Structure formats: structure tokens, C-alpha cells
Image (cartoon, coloured by chain):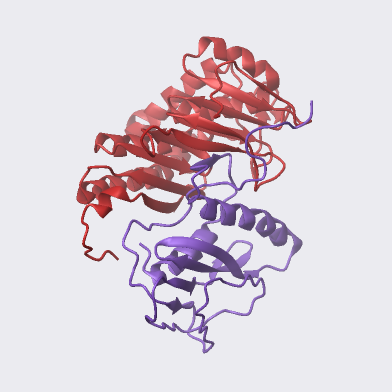
Chain colours: A purple, B red
Amino acid sequence: MKRAPIVITSTAAGLALVLSFHTSPPSSGVKTATGDTNGGKSRHPTASTSTTTGSTSATTGSTSTTTEPTGTDSARTATGSDIQYRYGDIQLEVTASGSKITDISIVKDGSDDGHSFQINSQAVPILQSESLSAQSAQIDGVSGATYTSAAYVQSLQSALDKLGIQ
Amino acid sequence: MTTATECPQALACEPIRRAESVMGTVASFDIRPGPVPPGLVYLALAEARARLHRADAVFSLWKTQSPMSRLRRGEIRLEDAPVELSEVLRQCEAARAASHGWFDPWAMPGGVDPTGLVKGWAAQQALDVLQLAGVPAAMVNAGGDVAVSGQPEPGRPWRIGVRDPWHAKRVIAVVSTSGAIATSGTYERGEHLLDPHTGRPSSPIASATVTGPDLGLADALATGVAAAGEAGLDWFGDLDGYEVLIVRHDGSRRRTPGFPSAA
């Protein structure tokens, strides 16, 4: 017997990770908030609907820039804190429309030994798909989901806080 | 940040999701408050989160001063330890019996180690708190050990994916459940499945997923089956309400007849 049929094959998981958005989309409009590490200078005047998925380590320490409302249905992006953890550091960027998260990408995945890379390359996609598909109607959660990085969640939570998704 | 909206009822309609970094993993909550007042829901959520952190504080073997660590070193007696310790160890005994000795915290190197049951037990406690508050439906997922109550939407049960052992982003099955579901496999980082009878690593199958009414026992049974392999299927005839799905190393599966696959 081969690995067979079942229901959903390549659908992502849905761990309902993260996110504490209970209601009230924060004010509509485009809003961007960027990382809060150690107050550097770079800005992220993001006002787009989708986020880029950088995996470089370009974005540490930036100041908060908040571009307030313009428009209607909000696509907002926020970069989370750069969080140190056992195998390196990680920083995420979250895009939300209203109180719905539409994308999560990694702006920094700083680890240079092979070990870390292996862990991140496994953990991050799991977490990304879990976070995103938590919002899909098909699956509410995943059993056996696993290696979950606290650092990822911290960075994500800080991005959500900036977006006012709480 | 909550702002007053035109529709105060909106709070009741929207799911509340919350992630908690605890027990070396992430525990997430998905709460459907229904008619329960938001204040009460948040109070219950705070208590549920506190239960998880307390379980971590009491049972962590990484924390050298946790009561569990101290008990292992013989610095405190069970009678002097927090009550949760006795409760969890009692459940461990029951799980050891149910698994015919394949889940055996007393056979672990370094002293009694209830870790295989604690995460599930703690998540179940957290869910119980929400249920006590009257929350009509909720899910607590502690790093892949999932406990649910009620239905997320009228007429629709919770649908939980079972992780594909080889592809982290995929699920190999979807389970409709009204209770608990736990999966154990050797793919998990840091997971060392030991054969309690020999003390040697054992991974006869790729993963084991157990469903049933209580997440503590489901968690322990999943660990036991993952170490025992297909022989574990035989235990379930005597376990009322518990079912198992096994994924073999070649990708094929076996399950007990009542395993609740979703349509």
C-alpha cells in the first residue's frame, strides 16, 4: 500500500498559532509598523497589500513608522521584534487585512550553522502554514504539529501588537 | 486593543485566538464565546493560560528547582509536593496499565518522567477551565496535542489534521473530533522514544495518533503506541472511547475500527 488517498494532501496545517485577534479590526487604513529592536534608522514605508518574503537579514533594528489611514479596507504590514533564540535569531513580518492575517514572512532568519538552518527550514514553514491556515475553514488545528519555536511566536506577537490585532 | 463598535454582539460572534509560549512549545487557544460575556471569557482564558504555566513550573525537568525535579532528586516527598504531582502520577499509572507497560514514566533514565503525559494533561486542564466558564466551544492545542469541546460552528465538528510524518506542511488525515487527539512520532525534534522494557530507542512505526475523551491519556497512549508499534492496536479493545491510527514507515496505515476520520 502506498501512502494513500486521504482527504487533504497538501493542505497546510492549521494550528491557530499566534494571533489574538478577537474582533475589531483596528482602524482601517494602511498602517505599517516596523521592528523595535534597538532603534536603528531604516524605514519601511510599506503600503502594499502583500508582503515580500525576504529571508535576508536586512531588517534589524528599525524604528517604528506608522503611516496612518488612507483608505478603506486595510492591508497593513508590521515587522515583529528581532528575537534571539538558541539557534540564532528570527524576525517576522505580518500582513493583515482588517483583523485577518493574510501573510507571514520572514525578514530575518539569522542562523549560520547548519544545525540552525535545518531547524529553521523545518520549523518556519510549519509555523507559517499553521498560522495562516488557522484561518481557513477546512482545518481547525493540527495534531503532531510540532517543533514550535517560541522565538517565532514572540516576533509574531510583537508584530500583531503593532498592528493592533489583539 | 478593543474599540467600541456599533455591534457589541460582535464580540460574541468572533473567535478569540491566543497563543502562549509555554512548556517549551506553543499552546494555542481558539475560543468560540457564543453568548458568554467577554469579561467572563477573558477571565477563563487567563486562568486557562495560568494552568499551563503552572504545569510548566511544577513539572518541568529543565527547571532544576521545579517540584518534579526536586522529587526526582529525593529532595521532597510526594506528600509535600503540589497536589498536581500526585494526580499526574496517578494518571501515569493508569496510562502505564492501559498501554501494557509501553508508556512507563518509571522506566525512563534519570528517574520518573511524566513528560509524555503532562503536556496533554495540562492542555486538557486548560480546556476544562473554559468549559466550566460555560464557553460553548473551544480548542486548546499544546504543540500538536489537541483538546476540543463543542462545535466551532453549528452542526460542524472540529476538524483536526494529522501531520504527515514526512512532510511538515502536509496532513495525512483529517479527524472530526469532539474530544482529544494526540500524535507521537519519531519525527519530532528532540523526541526520543524509548522501549521501556529495554531502555533502548524504538521506532517501529512512523507515527501514532490517538483520539479519545481525555488528552492526558491520549497523549500517553500515543507515546506508548509509537514505541510499541502495531501491537498497540490490541490495547484499544479494552479502552472505552479511545481509537488509534498508525502510520507505518512505508506510509501505509492501520487504524482501529472506530477511528473518527472526517468525511
Q: Residue at x 57, y 71 (%)?
A: A51
Specify whether A145 is left or right of A70: right
Above or below, B147 against A98 in this view is: above
Do we see residue B113 in this rendering? no
Q: Position of residue B54 (x, y in %)?
A: 36, 44
- Say which quadrant the C terminus of chain B sits in: top right
Disc tally is 0
- Say which quadrant the N terminus of chain B sits in: bottom left
Do we see residue B226 in this rendering? yes
Above or below, B204 against A166 in this view is: above
Q: Residue at x 54, y 29 (%)?
A: B262
Q: Residue at x 52, y 42 (%)?
A: A139
Residue that protrudes farthest toward the top in the picture: B238
Q: Residue at x 66, y 59 (%)?
A: A120
Q: Quadrant of residue A31?
A: bottom left
Q: Position of residue A110 (x, y in %)?
A: 65, 70
* Near-viewer residue (A77 or B13): B13
Q: Position of residue B240 (x, y in %)?
A: 47, 14
Above or below, B151 against B100 in this view is: below
* Near-viewer residue (B114 or B191): B191
Specify whether B78 is left or right of B228: left
Specify whether B67 is left or right of B12: right
Q: Position of residue A141 (x, y in %)?
A: 50, 42
Residue that protrudes farthest toward the bottom in the picture: A41
* Near-viewer residue (B126 or B245): B245
